[in-house]
Amino acid sequence: MLRFELLSGVNMENIKIDLGCWNGVFAVPNAVVDEHIKLAKEKHLKTLLYILRHGGEAISLEALCGALSLDTSDAEECIDFWIGRGLLKRCESSLAPEDAHGENKAEDNSLNAGAALQTAPPRKPTRPIRPDGVYITKRIMEDKEFAYLADTAQSIIGKPLSTGDLGILLNLHDMDGLPVDVISMLLQFCVSREKFGMKYIESVGMAWARDGVDSLEKAEEKIKVFEKQCDAWGIASSIFGLKNPGSPTKNQMETANRWLNEWGYNREALRLAYEICVDTKGEYSLRYIDGIIKKWHKRGACTIKEIEELNAKEKPKQERKTSYDIKQIESIDEFK
């Protein structure tokens, strides 16, 4: 609220206050400056200002990204920053003021109407900020459970952890809701794969949280599924003759797992698909091989005998057009 001091002797009946370009204004909650401006980055403040400016309107995430030159992940992180700071909350597909601070709603004009931001389905917030050293030290002294996690984590990783590292673990526990024993298993799993970086550990932990891994039993099952997918890719890469394939990608593991464990194709079938791919394209292509196997699966052919019978039925067509047309196979998108 703007405040004007009255000059003595001035007749206010004859005074008109014109705010000029300020006639179109919107309010910003005091807490933004009083509590959060030190930690908020430029993109966080821009995002909040844009949301406040369009309070009560239906704005899409795409519109926000376009106005602020942000990609989708950055825009969602900025929204999650203010949710994490207790200023906003999600209400179905809209954003509304968070009442956690017990502020008078009537004084907070900017958020009363809310911003009907058409965002993706609600998800657990990413880490908008990390706790500072003072807070982490306090938690270690007062929270025996977190103190145990900090000590265990250093033993598992085999080196002292920095404040930033401990902040990641604390956020996995506090913000993502992973229990201490699950985080310990997460650390052991990552170290067993020779992945010691805390950013990698954080990304895997966030994925576990999104998938609802909140117990040791669920964590064990998650690891079993991962190892099964890794084994499937190991078999496939060996069949394809890939030397030193390195750490498999998520797509490679999921694709090989689908062929071998879900659809039941054997080594001979995968080798046949590989040979068809190389004979047709002149090179190895995971996408092309996947297209061939998807075609077989769609037509109910799994064994070599069934595949040969399928090829025999389609032989007349092959005289006019190869049954493994490149564009046709690469356009197959079932099961994706």
Image: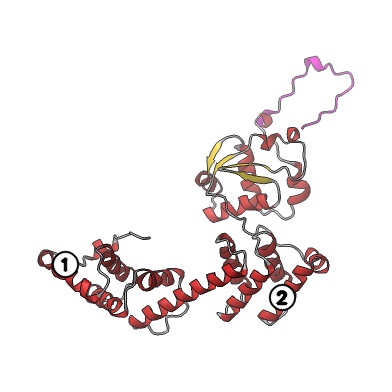
Q: Nearer the viewer, residue 135 or 185?
A: 185
Q: Residue at x 63, y 37 (%)?
A: 114
For the magenta stretch, what is the residue range? 1-21
Residue on which the image places disc 2: 161
Residue on which the image places disc 1: 322
Number of marks drawn: 2
Q: At which x and y percent is residue 152? A: 71, 77
Does residue 209 sit above or below 188 in this rendering? Answer: above
Which secondary structure dominates the residues rendered in magenta?
Answer: loop
Q: At which x and y percent is residue 46? A: 63, 47
Q: Alpha-carbon neighbours of circle 2 within 10 Å: few (<14), some, or many (≥20)?
A: some
Q: Nearer the viewer, residue 332 or 26?
A: 332
Q: Nearer the viewer, residue 274 or 222?
A: 222
Q: Examine the image and state in which quarter residue 155 appears.
A: bottom right
Does residue 197 sit above or below 122 in this rendering? Answer: below
Q: Residue at x 35, y 71 (%)?
A: 259
User: Disc 1 and disc 2: Cα gap in Å?
Assistant: 59 Å
Q: Alpha-carbon neighbours of circle 1 within 10 Å: few (<14), some, or many (≥20)?
A: few
- Is residue 10 shown in magenta? yes
> Label 2 amino acid?
Leu
Instruction: Name the N-terminal-most of marks 1 and 2.
Output: 2
- Is residue 63 shown in magenta? no
Q: Nearer the viewer, residue 182 or 75?
A: 182
Q: Secondary structure at mark 1?
A: loop
Q: Secondary structure at mark 2?
A: loop
> Label 1 amino acid?
Thr
